[in-house]
Amino acid sequence: MISEEEARKEILEAIRPLPARKLSVSKSLDFFAAEDYFARLQLPTFDNSAMDGYAVVATSCKKGQRLRVIGEQPAGIDRKLGISSGEAVRIFTGAPVPRAADAVVMQEDVTRDGDEIVINVDVEAGEFIRRRGCDLSEGQRILAKGERIRAATTALLASQGFAEVTVGGEVKAAILSTGDELVTPGGKLEPGQIYESNSALLNGLLKRCGAVVDFVEHCRDDRESLIEAIGRGIKNHILIISGGVSVGEHDLVKAALRDLGAQIDIWRVAIKPGKPFLFGCVKQRAPSPQSSPSGRERRTRSAGEGSVLGSECLVFGLPGNPVSAFVTFLQFVRPAILKMMGATDLDLPQVPAKLSVDLTNDSDRAHYIRGRVDHGMFTPVGRQESHALFGLSQSNALVRLALGQSLSADEIVQVQIWD
Ligand code: AMP
Ligand code: MG
């Protein structure tokens, strides 16, 4: 059994980012930038009006002042107008400010009288003018390599005239659940059976970190069936197998992986919940030359080509207990996927929170406590046992207790947030 830190280090060392490619900005949401981007234009690009109203010279604008309207400046065209004291230009939001004008008066603060206006407020220089460059300077970094592209990032790139952005790869993931006792939801439960729920959990977690789930299968605890199912699953960048990695007679995943020639780098990690965690890699089978270039085969091939390790698939064997699968996914699989996609920050977001109770870890493994953070207070939720899915569903955060660590109520700790 190795420590959690060693396991994470070993997994991340085995991973290289997928090749970068260009995407249209509109399709780049939630990918990671593969290079730094810098502003080509200052923002705003020219002084413009923040309101529909009248451009004026502030010094000639006392309340009650009468001004002559000498022209109109709409948005979208620069009429190169200029004004002097005692004059105004009808102006609209986003329109270039006329030369010598240094304020805009909102139309609501003006009474129009033919080709004159009366100003109903005092006016200060600079009012309702958006100065060029006040938001962003030319050359300023707008997106860092490894940063996630968010909705506002796509808008910023678009505002700079970028139609495309170079991003990291997209991870194609397969999910294989195992267990004779499991029934697919919708089916009928016989005594002793339970519904299969880890596929739903893993599908959600994979999507949340940006992976594409291309393959979901369930397999009985039977070595031959496992070998076949794993053989299909490894045609993706990563394969996540749930269950069957422990030490019982029905835990056949390790043996099946060995039969397929897998290299198993990690088995059993000092983490609670989640000890029987497995990490390794398997060579993907080359697609047969006669196979039709349609459907699954075509998808399979591109997944193989895109894989960092050439024709290898990374395999994560997660314990079948839902909470163990959840915790090991977040601590080991998530950072691996993010690294493959080219992310810089591989950690879950952390926030400080005050503990509502004392917490002690007297086990021989790092312990992740599931709980809820609300208004800066962390409270453990539900039974802290690896099968307790309801408690997990009510929680939104994890507190990590190192070996032998004790924390007291009211202490401020760093809490990992996943929702
Ligand atoms: P295993 O790791 O295969 O020994 O499974 C440990 C526990 O998790 C057992 O109680 C299983 O019934 C349960 N389990 C395994 N796989 C799943 C799954 N896909 N959905 C729900 N429970 C599961
Ligand atoms: Mg099992």
Image (cartoon, helix red, strand yellow):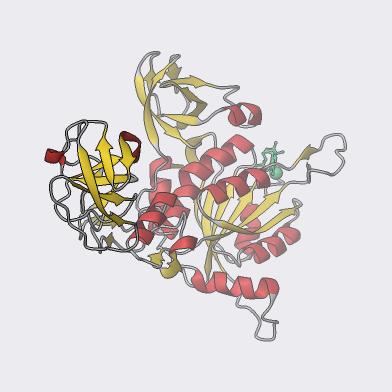
The residue depicted at 53 percent of the width and 44 percent of the height is 329
Q: Which of 122 and 204 is in front in this view?
A: 122
The residue depicted at 19 percent of the width and 35 percent of the height is 65
The residue depicted at 56 percent of the width and 50 percent of the height is 207
Instruction: Name the quadrant containing residue 319.
Output: top right
Residue 355 placed where, x, y %? 41, 18
Which quadrant does ligand 1 occupy?
top right
Q: Which of 224 and 70 is in front in this view?
A: 70
For the view shown, which residue lies furthest in the bottom direction? 290
Residue 300 placed where, x, y %? 62, 71
Q: In this view, does 405 lie above or below 234?
A: above
Residue 112 placed where, x, y %? 33, 41
Q: Is residue 318 above or below residue 227?
A: above
Residue 58 placed where, x, y %? 15, 40
Left or right position of 227 against 68: right
Instruction: Name the quadrant containing residue 302.
Output: bottom right
Count of marks, rendered view: 0
Left or right position of 146 against 266: left
Q: Which of 258 and 16 is in front in this view?
A: 16
For the view shown, which residue lies furthest in the front direction? 114
Q: Can residue 203 be seen in this view?
A: yes
Q: Is residue 28 above or below residue 383?
A: below
Q: Can residue 143 be seen in this view?
A: no
Instruction: Name the quadrant containing residue 77.
Output: bottom left
